[in-house]
Image: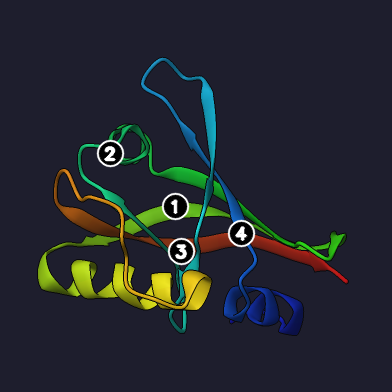
C-alpha cells in the first residue's frame, strides 16, 4: 500500500506533522510520533486532546513525515480517520511507539484515555 520511501520513513524515528480541521474550520498542525499497520497511518493521542475532538468533527487529515537528516525526503498522506482503537491496545501501542522514538516506555502522564487514530490514505506522495 505504501511506497518504499513512505515505508522507510514510517519505520524510522521521523516525526510527522499532523494536520486536522477544527470545529471553526481552521487548520491545526502538531508534531507527532507516527506508526502504521498494513493499510493505515496510526496516530496515538488522548480522547481529551483537541486533535481528537477535531477528527470527531471532521475526519479529514494530512500527515507529512520528513527525514530529519534531509527535509527534502518526505512523504505526504492525505486521508480520513476511519476508525479508532481505545483501551489496552491503545495503551500498549503508545509504549511500542515510545520505544521506537525514545528507547523506552511512554513516560508522560496520561490524563485521559489513549486512542489510536486509524487513517486511511486517499492520496499519498513521497520524494527522496
Q: Is residue 111 left or right of residue 73?
A: left
Tell me whether circle 3 and circle 1 mark residues in contact (CB < 8 Å). yes
Camera-nearest label, 3 or 4? 4
Q: Secondary structure at mark 3?
A: strand
Instruction: Find disc 3 in the rendering and name its residue.
Output: 120
Q: How far separated are the C-alphas under marks 2 and 3?
A: 15 Å
- Do labels 2 and 3 touch, CB within 8 Å? no
Q: Say which quarter of the image contains residue 70.
A: bottom right
Q: Residue 80 in the image: state x and y as whole percent.
A: 44, 52
Q: Is residue 13 left or right of residue 91?
A: right
Asked which secondary structure carries label 4, the reply is loop
Which residue matches tag 2?
A: 56
Cα gap from disc 3 to disc 4, whole angstroms: 19 Å
User: Which residue is identified by label 1?
Assistant: 80
- Specify the quadrant of the image occupied by residue 69: bottom right
Instruction: Write down the quadrant of residue 7 in the picture.
Output: bottom right
Is tag 3's residue or tag 1's residue first in the polypeptide sequence? 1
- Residue at left offset 31%, top offset 32%: 57
The front one of 17 and 81 is: 17
Where is residue 87? Give x, y as percent: 11, 65
Residue 15, labelled with which disc?
4
Label 2: element kind: helix
Of tags 4 and 2, which is closer to the observer? 4
**Disc 3 to disc 1, how far (Cα)?**
5 Å
Mark 1 to mark 4 CA distance (whole Å): 19 Å
Q: Are marks 1 and 2 in contact (CB under 8 Å)?
A: no
Quadrant occupied by the N terminus: bottom right
Residue density around tag 1, few if under 14, some if 14–19, many if 20 or more, within 10 Å: many
Residue 37: where, in percent of width, then height? 43, 80
Q: Are marks 3 and 4 in contact (CB under 8 Å)?
A: no
Amino acid at each position: 500500500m505504501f511506497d518504499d520511501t513512505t515505508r522507510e520513513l514510517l519505520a524510522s524515528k521521523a516525526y510527522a506533522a499532523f494536520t486536522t480541521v477544527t470545529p471553526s474550520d481552521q487548520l491545526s498542525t502538531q508534531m507527532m510520533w507516527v506508526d502504521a499497520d498494513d493499510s493505515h497511518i496510526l496516530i496515538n493521542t488522548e480522547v481529551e486532546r483537541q486533535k481528537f475532538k477535531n477528527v470527531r468533527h471532521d475526519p479529514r487529515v494530512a500527515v507529512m513525515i520528513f527525514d530529519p537528516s534531509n527535509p527534502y525526503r518526505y512523504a505526504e498522506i492525505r486521508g480520513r480517520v476511519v476508525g479508532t482503537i481505545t483501551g489496552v491496545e491503545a495503551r500498549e501501542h503508545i509504549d511500542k511507539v515510545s520505544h521506537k522514538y525514545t528507547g523506552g516506555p511512554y513516560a508522560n502522564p496520561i490524563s485521559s484515555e489513549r486512542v489510536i487514530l486509524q487513517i486511511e490514505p486517499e492520496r499519498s506522495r513521497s520524494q527522496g
